[in-house]
Amino acid sequence: MNPLRRGAAGRLQSRKGAASAPAPLDALARTPAAGDYAEFLRITLPRQEKNVASHRFGSERVWLKKAGPRHGKWGYRVMAAVARMAGLDIIKPVPNPGGEAAIATEARRLKTLAAAGLRVPAVLAQQADGLLISDLGESGRATVVLQERLDQAAAAGPAALLAVWREGLAAIAAVHVCGQHLSQAFDRNLVQCPDGVIGYIDFEDDPAEVMTLAECQARDWLSYLHSTAMMLEAAAPQAAGQHWHAALAGVSAEVRERITNTARRMKWAQKLPASRRWGRDTQRVRAVARLLGRWHLSSAPPVLPN
C-alpha cells in the first residue's frame, strides 16, 4: 500500500458534503434586476434549505450562507482535550456561536481581509440571518480546494506533495505580512483561484476575540499543519521541516516562541495510539506532535525544570 495515498479516499469522500464544495445551482421563479444583490438575497434566503449553497444570478455564481442553529461551545473535542491537557490555549477550538452572530462575524472578517488586499469572497449583500458573497472563480473557471490538490499531489510523490504544501505556507505568510490572521487555516479553507492566487474562505469565527495577534498567527500555522501532518509524516517529514522553518523565518519572535512552546507541551502526544480505531483526530494530533518534536525539539537545548 502506498503510504502517500493513505486516507486520501476517505478525505475525498468526506468532502462531498462540505460547505466549500459547490452545491447545485438554483433557478429563481422571478429574478431581481442585475446587480440587485440585496433583493436576490431577500428572495432566495427563505427558499434555501441548506445552510450554504451556490446559485446562478445572471452570469455570476454566488454563494448564500444562511444563519443556522446556534452551535455548542466545543466543536473539536479531541483538540479541546489536547489543549486542556497540555495547557495550550493557542490550539483550543475558538467558540463559534453559529446563528446570526456567525453571519455578522463572517461579513466583518471578509471586509477586513479584503481591505488588506487579500483574496477573499466579496460581500455582495447582508442581512441579519443571511449573507451573499461572490465566488472566487472567474470566467466560468472554478477554484480548486488546496486539500484536493494535496491529495492529488501525494499520489504523485513527495516532491509534488511538498511543492503544493509550500503554496499553503506562502499563502498563510501573505496573510500575516498584512498584519492579519485567518479563522481556520486548514487546507480545506485555502483555494486556488483560476489565476493561480490562493484565496481564503470560511470565517464564521474570529480567534482575535479570545487571543492576541501573535497567538492567532501561531494558531494559523498550527492549524495548517494539523490538516496536513498525516500525509507529510508519511511522505517527507525532513524536507517538510526545512520548508516549515524557511516559512517561519519571517515571523516575529513571539510567534516562533509560541510554536516552539507548543512543540514542547505536545511532546506527550507523540505516544498517542496510531491505530485508526482511535479516530482520525487522534491520528492527526499524534502526527502534529511528532513533526513538531522532530522540527523544534530534536536539536533544541534541554528545558530546565521550573
Image (cartoon, rainbow, N blue to C red):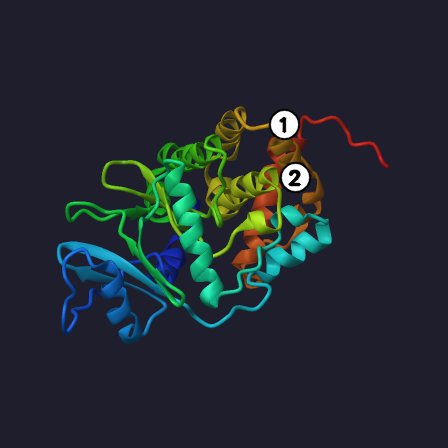
- Looking at the rendered structure, the kind of residue marked 2 is Ala
Residue linked to disc 1 = 253
Counting residues from the N terminus, which is met first, the one under dot 2 or under dot 1?
1
Hey, which quadrant is residue 214 in on the image?
A: top right
Q: Position of residue 125 (x, y in %)?
A: 30, 58
Q: Is residue 253 above or below residue 53?
A: above
Decide if residue 240 is on the left or right side of residue 124. right
Between 242 and 184, the one nearer to me in the picture: 184
Q: Residue, x 54% and y 24% (percent of image)?
A: 249
Residue appearing at x 15%, y 49% in the figure:
140
- For the question of whether residue 1 can be seen, the reply is no
Q: Quadrant of the C terminus?
A: top right
In front: mark 2 or mark 1? 1
Residue drawn 62% across and 50% down? 210
Helix, strand or loop at mark 2: helix
User: x, y percentage for residue 145?
Assistant: 33, 48
Number of marks drawn: 2
Q: Which mark is residue 263?
A: 2
SS at badge 1: helix
Residue 146 location (% of width, % of height): 36, 45
